[in-house]
Amino acid sequence: MSKLIKFEIVTPERKVMEEEISQVTVPTLAGEITVLPEHIPLVGVVVPGVIEGVDKEGNPLVVSVSGGFVHVLKYKIVILADTAERAEELDESRLQEARQRAEDLKKDTRHMDQERFANINASLAKELARGKAVKRWKKIKNLNK
């Protein structure tokens, strides 16, 4: 039996995931990092993107994340995320509408203060990450058929 890592993703609203996994790839400020069992301990900043992993049965895990922090220990990884959603929970048509709304808001930057502009950019980054997670999930599911 191969070694496993306890993996948790927690947001202010809920625990999104608690699994035993064999590996996970996380988007960070320093780039994507892949964590395997017995990884050196680290703490990092998670950026908007897609978290991909493999559970103990070899099934893929795909999660959209909008940012947060990752804490890696020898046999445990915890991600404290601003928002996180499993790809299979996401509705692609609603994602396209939300992305379009964020892009429309971003176009009218002349009458916007820096805080509002930053919030719109964060919203757009979140929607792009969610869309990327759905596309990745669909690709994985089609490969497994």
Image (cartoon, rainbow, N blue to C red):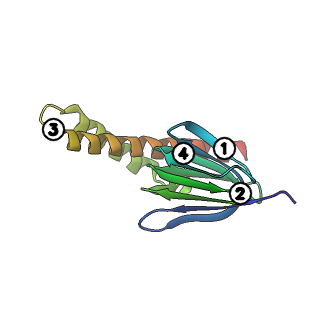
Give the mark nearer the N terminus: 1 vs 4: 1
Residue 104 shown left or right of residue 45 in the figure: left
Give the mark nearer the N terminus: 4 vs 3: 4
Which is closer to the viewer, label 2 or label 1? 2
**Of 52 and 43, which appears nearest the observer?**
43
Give the mark nearer the N terminus: 2 vs 1: 1
Q: Which residue is the site of mark 2?
A: 74
Q: Secondary structure at mark 3?
A: loop
Q: CA distance from mark 2 to mark 3?
A: 46 Å
Indicate the quadrant where residue 21 lies: bottom right
For the view shown, which residue lies furthest in the bottom direction? 14
Q: Secondary structure at mark 1?
A: strand
Q: Which residue is the site of mark 3?
A: 112
Q: Residue at 76% across / 59% down in the picture? A: 4
Q: Which residue is the site of mark 4?
A: 50
Q: Residue at 18% across / 33% down in the picture? A: 108
Give the mark nearer the N terminus: 3 vs 1: 1
> What is the three-letter code of the residue carrying label 1?
Thr
> What is the three-letter code of the residue carrying label 2?
Lys
